[in-house]
Amino acid sequence: PVPASARAMASPVSPGDPPSSPDQVLKFEPWQSAVDPTFWAELARRKLDNFGLREDPVPIDGLFACSMHAEVSSPVALDKRSFETWTSVANDALATGQQRAPGTLRNVNTFERFKEYDRGAMLDESADAVWRAVVSGDAARDPHLLNQFHVLTFADLKKWHFTYWFAFPTLKLPEAVRVVATQALGTFLGFQEDPVETSFTKFEQHACDAFAWCVVTSENTPQKGFMSFPLHEFNSLASEYGPENVHVAFMDSSRNPDHPGWSARNLLLLASLTFDVDKKKGPRSLNLIATRKRNGKVSLRHSMVFHVTLPTIAVGGELHKLDPEKRPFPAVGWELNPKGRAGPRRADLGESMDPTRLAVAAAELNLKLMRWRLLPELDLAKISKTKCLLIGAGTLGCSVARCLLGWGVREFTFVDNGKGSFSNP
């Protein structure tokens, strides 16, 4: 038997469950980037071996997951695998609950070029790609296209400093999406956790790379109350089960109970333009299910349902009138720096990747190992501070200097009255 609370799901807000907040503009938590040092190492290698002085766009992929922790939201992560094709990393990524964010890398040759780069044109380029995906219907079939990003980089390979700036483009609607009520997923469904988790698991097995999908809550479904379907089937599901029983779910990176993550912005744009949502009560209503996990499972307590009203822009039947090459909405989405201001970030990997520093670290490690075996009482710190005066810098003097250098001496003064020449190395 289906619980009474399940039969009440025909209403966007369950009876007896007042809105948690008054009607207000829905806000979104911006994306955060997380770049692993292996990404910069691979970029440096490709810059030297492949890119050269070319500044052509390079396709890359970021990975993100739904929120796993109450304190920290999930970022868009890049590592060495970001340069590989998605098919080669998909199995490992999806097995750990990560989803794809397709992106584009532009690496420039000088810092001056980085500062002068037309970032507005770069943001528009990504926003145009999102718009084309929405209008063509590709975004409904492959929701990952809603999460496209751009990253502008400059790699100073002499100092191993990397300057970068991410753009996560979203299209700004002329009217804001408003939230009427916010509820925990468990409160909204009234179900025990097992049926919900089973449904999500079965859908992930059917379309495991789906970032967003449809949820139907109706007694007429084969599972008697809760089923998941691909996102592009929204309108057919609304026609079969009623738009008030069809909702949109997505993997939400935000841990904030009051705001969904940045990826919901383009998802709601898609819904506003293409979905036949519930209009029985006046405003165009939709339940947005922000799925979040704890201990590897969908958490009914931490996953949130945002009952929103969508702006009237165009209904599904009018979508063909929109020009995919003429985006009518402005784009926003530049990532803020650690100070919370509009500006780039910088990664200093000099200590971990600079060849000179690595050589010094390797020599010091070798000395410590030799001390353990040969001379435990040797004071390496005292040797490293020793200053050496070498009288004569010929064959013997240079050999002595190399020996002392191997034992940690760092400061030398050479005295020699000979004359060096290129013909006498």
Image (cartoon, helix red, strand yellow):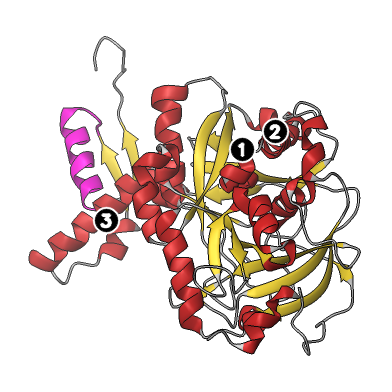
- Secondary structure, mark 3, is helix
The reply to whether residue 253 is in sight is no
Q: Amino acid at mark 2?
A: Arg
Query: Residue 413's quadrant in the figure?
Result: top left
Question: In terms of image quadrants, where is residue 373?
Answer: bottom left
Percent across and percent down for residue 63 are 49, 52
Q: Which mark is residue 138?
A: 1
Mark with earlier residue (2, 3): 2
Mark 2 vs mark 3, foreground winner is 2
- Foreground residue, 120 or 278? 278
Q: Main secondary structure of the magenta part?
A: helix
Question: Alpha carbon of mark 2 to alpha carbon of mark 3: how far?
Answer: 56 Å
Q: Residue at the location (62% across, 45% down)?
A: 140
Q: Position of residue 378 (x, y in %)?
A: 19, 67
Q: Are marks 1 and 2 in contact (CB under 8 Å)?
A: yes
Q: Is residue 398 magenta?
A: yes
**Residue highlighted by disc 3:** 364
As displayed, is residue 88 above or below residue 76? above
Q: 35 or 396: nearer the eye?
A: 35
State which tag comes first along the sequence, 1 or 3.
1
- Sequence-first tag of 1 and 2: 2
Q: CA distance from mark 1 to mark 3?
A: 56 Å
Element marked by disc 1: helix
Give the quadrant of the C terminus.
top left
User: In this figure, which residue is indicated by the disc labeled 2?
Assistant: 132
Mark 2: secondary structure: helix
Residue 214 placement, left or right of 81 = right
Left or right placement of residue 420 versus residue 57 in this view: left
Up-down relation of residue 91 to residue 120 (above or below):
below
Amino acid carrying label 3: it is Glu
Q: CA distance from mark 1 to mark 2?
A: 8 Å
